[in-house]
Amino acid sequence: MNTRVAPPSAPLPARPLVRASACPHDCPSTCALEVEIEPSGRIGRIRGAKDNSYTAGVICAKVARYAERANHPDRLLTPLLRTGPKGSGQFRPVSWGEALDRVADGLLAAERAHGAQSVWPYYYAGTMGLVMRDGINRLTHAKGYSRFFSTICVNPAWGGYLAGAGRISGADPREMASSDLITLWGTNAVATQVNVMTHAVRARKERGARIAVVDVYRTPTMEQADIPLLIRPGTDGALACAVMSVLFRDDLADRAYLARYARDTAALEDHLKTRGPAWAAAITGLPETDIEAYARLVGTTPRSFFRIGYGVSRTRNGAVNMHAVASIPVVAGAWQHEGGGAVHSVSGIYGWNKTMIEGLDVRDPAVRALDQSRIGPILTGDKDALAGGPEVKALFIQNTNPMAVAPEQEKVRAGFARDDLFTVVHEHFLTDTARMADVVLPATMFTEHDDLYQAGGHPHILFGPKMVEPPGECRSNHDVVRALAARVGAEHPGFAMSPRELADWTLRATGRGTLAELEAARFRDVGLPFAQAHFLDGFGHADGRFHFAADWAGLPFSSPGKFGPVADMPALPDHWAVTEAATADYPFRLVTAPARNFLNSTFTETASSAGREGAPSLLVHPEDAAALGLAEGDMVRVESGRGAVELTARLFDGLRRGVVVSEQIQPNRAHRGGRGINTLTGADPVAPVGGAAFHDNRVRLVRVAGV
């Protein structure tokens, strides 16, 4: 009898390896990640780490789709040398040896002819890893190149917070889950830091907490609010003053707390008698009854938590706005309670010793520091922007795309187009900035190198290990900086160290243990004890008190000087009317808000993100559109004194009349006319420590006929 033989079973497909990492992008969440490594050696799905108490298993959709970006067919894989006009995108592949020699020759030629300060290493937060982001400073300091003054993000916000609290820290954001009232002020958390919503919504489900949202348009976050507070751009200080005036007027201010922890309380109370809800309603556009109701809710809810975002500060009065908003939980005494108080950033808790990463031991403070946000004026020869030094003749750029993200783009474009400017860009894709380069170098992504991370929106340090080999000939920021150092004669012990050695040295020197310990743990919570996080042992000023009267001229912020009309800044919380007000010629206020599926100019190259965002567009109130003869989908020309951009009109009633919003930083070539949104934004520095006012622009709208 024949025996049936079973066919051999098909081999089971290999299961992906899962490894721990950290999100490298410019977001306060700095999520703890779990990354799948496919049998092919490429990354696959990415998800949030469930055992990290802040990430709690939740990450944004754009990072969850990161494999699409890492494995993109348009990714740069070999060094390129420009063969056509600047901006043409015409390059030829070259070897790394030829590319590095060409870069070194360009930097050395500028140094010989014009001095070391004619070279400007320029970077930012395309990665937030301490080694890969900040290592470029080691080259800067070792060579005496022009130093980099970072201004494009935190300066107005941190200046305002420091003026009051004296330290960049605050309540643990996970305490939102223990709160009874959560105010998300100037942050579209659904789009830009989704984990905030995880903890806020948990409080609503478990405690019946109410969520208030203060913003300048009806964001997806405001759509989830119990208490939506829609204000005009730049009027946060007025609303904050009115709230505090009600607290004092109705005996809801915690006078015992104020007596112990605050300074200038009597002056503030007297000042606010003329800044009540009726006054604020006229400025903000909010109904007086809404201001009254919200203020009373704050005053009668001890566990009242303020999550203050950067949107508060992206105007010319931004530092004053931040100081005013941060004053509210002090007047209410909310800091005394778990689930109460405020947080903007906890970046001040880490205390890193970055001597080896940045070469701080060879830093010469006499070398000028050039303002990141003023790259347009700098490259076009503005004497004030050049801080008394030579013209910039060579740029070495990592981790940023100033041809899209920097303000005053017409000047940026003109500067990059200079024939006498030698430009090197180390990048993932052929961005707008890379297209203007003489040499383009292909860069690794975060799963392809080792790095150390800190969070800004929660108190964790994390390690992101190299998981996969980089594609093509991509090299890390550290490897490129080290190779250039050898060619241009820069000396420092950090150049001889690996990224892992630099991370380990930094951890040890800061008293944070070793890299081996951190890697084994995957992440470490280094949050402050409750009393310290809530300033119950004193605020960060020498007298231990919150300062209602700000000393703007003496602000303890590391900067090469003070900027803007510092002498005119109000000491006490107020509405400071220095924003770019609408005029008869430019009757609209433009806010350039973040897009949900992009992160600044990152992710614009991935099809899924670009498809979800659609064409560059402008949100216009239907009544404003009707007055201009604009219909949904019409092309509209948005003009300011700095230039013009063409966008697709989208009718949206979640705005105050006279306000328009563009959610994007799309590539310039995605716009009809080739001009991106930052053509319209100004590079004049925000008082008192610099920064750009991206949400503070007066414009006019003109329908483009025949399109």
Image: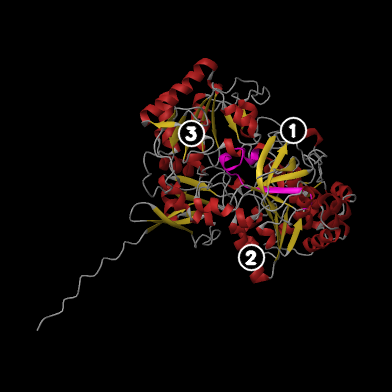
The structure residue drawn at horizontal position 77% and vertical position 47%, both measured from the top left corner, is 628
Of the numbered discs in the image, which one, if any, rests on residue 344? none
7 with respect to 147 (left or right)? left
Residue 495 spot, x, y in % from top left:
42, 32
133 with respect to 652 (left or right)? left
- The outermost residue toward the top is 113
Q: Are marks 1 and 3 in contact (CB under 8 Å)?
A: no
The structure residue drawn at horizontal position 76% and vertical position 43%, both measured from the top left corner, is 320
Residue mark closest to the camera, 2 vs 3? 3
The structure residue drawn at horizontal position 56% and vertical position 25%, both measured from the top left corner, is 364
Let me know if residue 359 appears in the view.
no
Q: Is mark 1 on a helix, strand or loop?
A: loop
Count how many numbered circles sit on residues in the image: 3
Indicate which disc, 1 or 3, sits on the residue closer to the N terminus: 3
- The outermost residue toward the bottom is 1
Query: Quarter of the image holding residue 706?
Result: top right
Residue 56 spot, x, y in % from top left:
53, 62
Q: What element carries label 3?
A: loop
Name the residue beneath numbered marker 1. Answer: 564
Indicate which disc, 2 or 1, sits on the residue closer to the N terminus: 2
**Mark 1 neighbour class, 10 Å CA radius: few under 14, some 14 to 19, many 20 or more:** some
Depth check: give the residue in front, 364 or 546: 364
Residue 573 spot, x, y in % from top left:
80, 46
Indicate which disc, 2 or 3, sits on the residue closer to the N terminus: 3
Depth check: give the residue in front, 319 or 374: 374
Marks 2 and 3, how far apart at CA: 47 Å
In the rendered image, the quadrant that contains the N terminus is bottom left
The range drawn in magenta is 656-678
In the rendered image, the quadrant that contains the C terminus is top right
Name the residue beneath numbered marker 2. Answer: 201
Of the numbered discs in the image, which one, if any, rests on residue 89? 3
